[in-house]
Structures are given as structure tokens and as C-alpha cells.
Amino acid sequence: MKTMGGVLAVLGAGALLVSGWRSAAQPPVSLSVKMELGTPPSTTMRFLHQVVAGFERKYPNIKVSISTYTGSPATLVDTMVASHQGPNILEIGTTFIPTLAYSQAFVPWTPAMQKQVVPQLIPAATQMDGLAGQRPIGIPDSASPFVLWYNKAMFKQAHIGAPPTTWSQFVADAKKLTNAKKGVYGAGIAPGDPFYSMHTTWLLSRQLGGQVINAKGSQALFASPQVYKAAKFYLDLLTQYHVVNKADVQFAESDLINAFMQGKVAMVPVGGIYDLTQLKTDPKFVVHNLGVAPNPWVPYGRTKGLPGVPRIESFVSGQEQVIFKYSSSPAQVAAATKWIQYYTSAPTQVLMWKEYGDLPVNKGSFRNRALQTPLWKSFLYIEQHSLPTPKVPGWLQLPTVYDKAMGNVFDQAALGKYAKGDLMKTLTSVDSQINATLAGMQN
Amino acid sequence: MRQSSVRRVPWGFLVPGVLLVAAYALWPIIVTIYMSLENLNIFFLANWLHAPFVGVGNYVAAFEPNSPVGSVFWPTLENALVFSACAIGIGLPMGFLAASAMNRNMVGRAFFRVLFIVPYAIPVFVSGLAWRLMFMQQTGAVDRVMALLHLGNGQTFWLIGSNSMVALIIANVWSSWPFFYLFILAALQSVPGELYEAGRLDGAAAWGLLRYITLPQIAKPVLISVSLSFIYHFNNFSLPFVMFGTTPPNQANTLPLNIYLFGFSNMQFGAGAAMAVISMAIVLIPMILYIRTVRVGN
């Protein structure tokens, strides 16, 4: 027995030595990661340093260097793609993902890579991962569902029991809540904010069974009947139903949230979860007044959704991580996969939520008790019922043209210079501008 | 033979530096011109040298008022010209008046000299944001003050429609007029006092001194400041961007902002580059004027 034990001990020691030698023989891998700098910056850095420390403890052979960026990543991405130089991993918003996939400068995820990460994520959050029908290039690291913010106290005062689920009810409630003389409005919008008009119109037009761009991504459809109807309803909130303050036309979303916090606006449709950062500056408001609900989904004038049209209350949005092809060796791609797996693991996601308040994308995160409040359950529900915006190369170009055009339509309406027919003219012009751009894109 | 080789020595020292500066200055221009001849979008960006060559196609599109590019190019060019002209037209007299006042001995001169430079020293991101907040309808200071003085009803939109250009010009003049002030003050201080003494002896009054001594003496520096100012304002991207973001009203969408939107938001780098080259050609006019005025090389 003793001899046998000795042999086993020697074998065990040998195995340990071999594994130790193998581990030591693996060349170290350096990984550069560029993340968007959140608010406040000190929180971002504290969180990221914790993640890096945990990751390097788990994978001692991988050394991570973190850097951050602020503002629009367009210039950063353009420079990276043109110069073939950049970090191994870039964190970027979902809006960019299809266009980045089209550039072919980012690593497509193989099924083996996906198997390491995707099963742990909320399925809906992974829908905006690249171009339709092609391998994904992006993995979500946080979700940002777009919701209906409402002021619970104002609802109570107006004897409105629950947030609206139809747009007719939304208008009716907003009318009840509006007191223009006191500068109080039932709803608020931000047509001057990049993406706001595009997001709102996309949501409304999908609920009407329409699309803003065809499936191939080769033709814009803003002048189509459904999108026109959607855009008109959006505009009618100001021009026909008068439930929106004219001053909103000059608003960025932060201005709108400010008015919401001051009790000047009762409902904000298509508000981003990132508004929470601003809302949290008034903790009393968040605790006592802040209501969150899915956006209404039944088109105006109807009591039920259109037949054959899925229930759409929000769209997939958030931050994703992509691996830059030109600067990443196979070893770095493997290390990057491990990094993204670690970043999207339940403990890291819960830590991210605690630090920032971003919605986790890991299914397991929601077993954490702190995330089982009505507010966060609502966010999870909305995220789970979100659909992706078009996964076509030109998706990024659409808001640039459309938001600016709609901004000017709203400006004219606020100045009393809007004439019937202007909207259709604008949408037709948007189509021609976008189609000219799309014609130049080849695949 | 020996003398000519000695003469060549300085050239030998100069050539590497000249080549370096030329490459540094010219290379981005060459790249921009090349890009303007391509149909360059995000798909070709990784191999931008091999993007489809379209010749002058992007320029034709920009000059065609009914094309998607031209329909935006012409109004934004007009806006940029109006913006620059107003910055000079308003800022220059303000600078001249302030410089004339500060050129005399007066109580608090040191204080005012510092005060006048403050707007110029404040970063445009700060002043742009402050002006944006002040021009907000209903809640902004401008609207409130105007209502208080019965000059408005408190419902004036400054950040949309045609007023948006007025707001942009006011914000711009506020931050840029000290440039003229500094230039003109320096010029005024270099005018020899004897000229004024002689003028007075000849019986010239204030107007005569201004017309026959001051203005001719400072004409060249003023011309230089106008040239430089035009170049700066015509290329001013920061202020319109800070005040209006990427969804500017049509009336306040200036050419540099439009080039940025085409290039970096719309990712139509070829069309954006073509507009940038046209913009550069326009800026060459005051630049040539400037070079001729200062007689570079003499």
C-alpha cells in the first residue's frame, strides 16, 4: 500500500510539474481594451480596474491594458479602420455594429467562440450583433432598453391608474396631464437629440407593420405609408394634440429629462436607461415619482395591435465589445474571447450594475436579490421583449439624415411655419439623400 | 567654382528641413484631394487607396444644387460666408473702438485690458454651451431679460429657424472680437506720436487725425487681421457643433459642420473630402491676400 501511495504521489507531483511547466511555457499575451468612459469617470475607472485585477488573477498569462474614450466613437473607429491600428477590443454602441461589420475590420465570432460567451446572455440582448445573415462581430456587455418614463405623482393627481399601453391612451392621458398655462405638459420629446427621432419613428412604424429601410438595406422607405403615418403621429403630438411643449423642439434628451424632473413633463416615451444617471441626481424624485413602463405598442386609433405584427415595445440597444481584426493575433483573439466571457459573467455584470446602473446582459445576474426590485424587473422585461433595429450596412447613416430633417420639420411647426405636405416632402427628400448614399455602398 | 560651392552649403542645410515641413504640410492635403476623387465609404475605408475612383464626380455632385450633396453644400457654404462676414463686420468695429479707448491714458485701463481679453481666453466649448443655455426659449436668460425689458414676449426661439444664425453670430462675436482688439491695439501703439503732433500743428482735428494718420498707419495690420479672421471663422467647426450638435437647424448649418456630418456621421468620406477641398480653395483667397500683405519671403 505504501509503495502504491508513493508511486501515486510521484505521479501526481510529476503531473503538477508538467502542468506548471506548460503554464509557464505559454507566452504571455497582451490585450489592449478601449472602453467608453461612463459618468462619472472616476466610477468607470474604479470599476474597470477591479475587472482587470480579477481577470488577470484568473488568467495570469494575459496582461490587460485599459484605455477609455469619450464622445462619439465615429472618428475613433474611422481612424482605426483606415490606419489598421487600434486596440484589440473596442466597446461601442449597438447602432454602430452593422456598419462596423460591413467594414470587415472586426473579427467575426466563430461558433466555438460564441459557445464560450453567448449561452450566458439574455437572448434578446444579443440580437444586434452584426449584419443580418452573417456571423456576429459584437457581444453585448450592457443593455440599454428604451422605456416610457412617467411621473407617478402626476399620474396619481390626474387619477390615472396605470401607464398607457396604446398610443390612443397615451394621447388621452397626456391631454389630462397637460396644463399649458402652468407650463406643464403630458408628454415630452427631444427632436433635437441625435437618434431620438429615428428611434421613435422606427418603433412607431414597426408597430404599424412598416420598415424604414428594405431588408437588403438598399432602399430607404421613409416616404412609405406606414413610416409616414408614424412620423405624422410623432409630429402630431406637438401640432395636433398639443400635449408637447413647443420648447421641446430645441431640447436634447438631457434638457427633456431636466423638465421631467421638474414636473414640467409627465411622460417621456422612448427614454434611455442612461437617463437614470441624470435622474439619480435627485434621489427623492427617483424613489417617489419615477415610474418606468414599456412604451405603448398599439398604434394610435386602435385598441389592439395590427394582425401579424409582433408586440414591439422597445429595441435592442446598449454597449457591445468587438475584436479589431488588424491588430489581433490568434492568441489575442483567444484572450479577447476570455476577456469578453469574464466581462459578461454574472459577478462582473452585477458589479457593473452596482457601479454604473447599466442593465446587465447576463441571465444569472438577475438572481441577485438587489436586482429583483419592480424597477429593475421592468427593465429586464422590456429588454427581453426588445427587437433589433435593421441589421443593414447603412443603418448608421439613417439617423444622421432623418434626425436632422425631422428636427427642421419640428422647428417649422414650433414657429408656426409648418404647412400640410411639408412632412411628405421632407420624407421623400430623406429617402433620396439616403438612397444616394446607399447606392455607393457595395458588398 | 569655390565660391559657388560655398553658396550651396546653406541650401544643403535647409533642404532636409524644407522637405520635412513640405511633407508635413502637404501630405494631408494630398490625401484629402485623393480621397475626394474616390467613392470612399466605410466599406472601402480599410483599403482606402483602392476605393472606386470617380474622378471629379464628387465635385460635380457638390456643385449640382439639386443633387443630395449639392442641396446641402450650397446652403451651408452660404451660411459659412454669412457667419464669417458678420464676425468680421461686427467684431472689427468693436475691436477698433475698444483698442482706441485702451490706447489712451484712462482710469482702470489695466483692468479693462484684461477684461476685454477674457471672452477670447474662454474655451469655445464653455462659451458655446453657456450661450446655448442662455438662448433657450422660455428658460434662457436672453428670453427672460428681453421679456423683462418688454423687448419680447419670452417665447422667442433663438436656437431654431432663422434666429439660430443670429444666436450663433452673437455667441461668435462675443468670443472673437478681442482678436481684432489685440491686433489693432498693437498697431495703434506702433504709430509714431510725432505724426499726430505734426498733424495737430497742421490744424487737423480728431477726424482728420483718424482719417489721414491712424487709418493709413494701421491699414496693413487690419487687413492681416481680417484675412486671418476670415480663415478662422470660415473654418469654425467648434462653436456651431457645441451649440447645435449633429442636428443643426438648416439656417445654422455651416460648411465645416456639414463636412463633418458627411464624413464622419454619414461616412461618405469622398463627398466630405470634395467639400473640404472646395472649402480650402475658398480659404486660399484671403490666404493669398495675407501672404501678399505681409510679403512673406521679403
Image (cartoon, grey):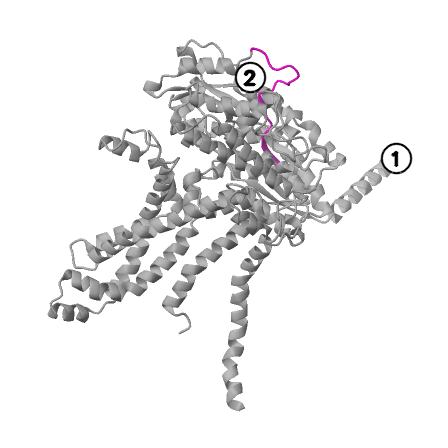
Dot 2 amino acid type = Pro
* Marks 1, 2 in one chain: yes
**Element on which disc 2 rests:** loop
User: Disc 2 sits on a residue from what chain?
Assistant: A
Residue indicated by mark 2? A299
Q: In this picture, is A253 found above or below B191?
A: above
Q: What's under tag 1, amino acid-wise?
A: Met
Whether residue A52 sits left or right of residue A168 in the image: it is right
Q: Residue at x 39, y 11 (%)?
A: A157
Q: Give the answer, above or below, for where B212 lies relative to B113.
A: below
Q: Residue furthest bottom?
A: B1
Q: Nearer the viewer, residue A374 or A12?
A: A374
Q: Quadrant of the C terminus of chain B?
A: bottom left
Bounds of the magenta span? A303-320
Residue identifier under label 1: A4
Residue A48 coordinates in the image, percent (x, y): 56, 38
Instruction: Using residue B55 as the reference point, say whether residue A249 is left or right of it.
Output: left
The first of marks 1 and 2 along the sequence is 1
